[in-house]
Amino acid sequence: MCVIIYSKIGTEINENELKEAWETNPDGAGYAVIENNKVNYKKGFMKFKEFLNSFRKYNNKNYEKIVHFRITSKGSTNKRQTHPFKKNNPNITEYTGRKPVYFMNGTISNLTLEKGLNDTATYIRKYRNGIKANQQGINILSQATSCRWAVATPRGIFIPDDFIEEDGLYYSNLNHKYINYYYSIKADPKNYYEYEYSLKEIITNKKLRKQIYKDKTLLNEVEDFIYNVCNNYLCYNCPDCISYAKNIEELEEIINNYK
């Protein structure tokens, strides 16, 4: 799933929202800012407090900035797999310079991974040649992979045309905003007590998800949708995924279509 949040000069990202994005995408974070006509990025944050302590000094209206929170779909879960990535040196976790760095939200299927890299890093190393690090280039990457990309360059940060604008910020998806609205499991499988879990808890808590999926009678509404359509994670690969919902009404419509 993952989420990318882009903040222009003149805007900042609420820290509570950063926390929600982390909790929904808990496999590591990174950010990039444009500073003194250079790209400055740090990644490899595996704890939210560490991320926030580093990012906070840039999270104001003076900086153009972009953040990425990851859920693992391809590759390992570790510091090096967090975003962004440089084309020729994807494993470094800090960089200041004039080379572009790339972020992605999505999963690239039918791609053989390079050793130690995920699909994002593998793809830019293999296929970025000839694609410029600008608005047109980022649209090409997004269309070619059915994912949402972003690139930070000394000239600024470029996102595809289909990012979602809300309150002056731009998002690759809005799952972290709307995922907590659904508390739809209320079952008593052993007549001992009542369960009540949120969609967010089910996505981010692998042990809980495994426990629930053992008994399909526990699945209804949103959880039934996840089980039948995605089976594992909300991976952003299909237009019927709730990742595409821009608001509560669209989310309900997508889910109701599968009832």
Image: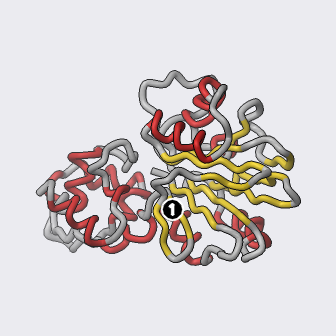
The C terminus, quarter of image: bottom left
Side of 92 relative to 223 (left or right): right
Note whether residue 82 is visible. Answer: no
Residue 1 position, x and y percent, is 45, 50
Here the colouring is secondary structure
Note whether residue 121 is visible. Answer: yes
Could you tell me which residue is drawn at 77 percent across and 46 percent down? 93
**Other-residue count near label 1 (Cα within 10 Å), few / some / many at <14 / 14–19 / ≥20:** many
Choose between 204 and 58: the one closer to the eye: 58
Which residue is disc 1 drawn over? 171
- Mark 1 residue type: Tyr
Q: Residue furthest front?
A: 136
Please tell me whether mark 1 sits on a helix, a strand or a loop.
Answer: strand
Q: How many marks?
A: 1
Side of 212 relative to 70 (left or right): left
Choose between 138 and 126: the one closer to the eye: 138
Could you tell me which residue is drawn at 51 percent across and 21 percent down? 112
Could you tell me which residue is drawn at 56 percent across and 57 percent down? 4
Residue 49 position, x and y percent, is 69, 68
Dividing the picture into quarters, in which one does residue 244 lie? bottom left
Is residue 113 placed above or below 148 in the rendered structure?
Answer: above
Side of 102 relative to 178 (left or right): right
Residue 190 position, x and y percent, is 15, 64
Dividing the picture into quarters, in which one does residue 60 lie? bottom right
Residue 35 position, x and y percent, is 83, 60
Could you tell me which residue is drawn at 68 percent across and 54 percent down? 157
Is residue 52 placed above or below 145 in the rendered structure?
Answer: below
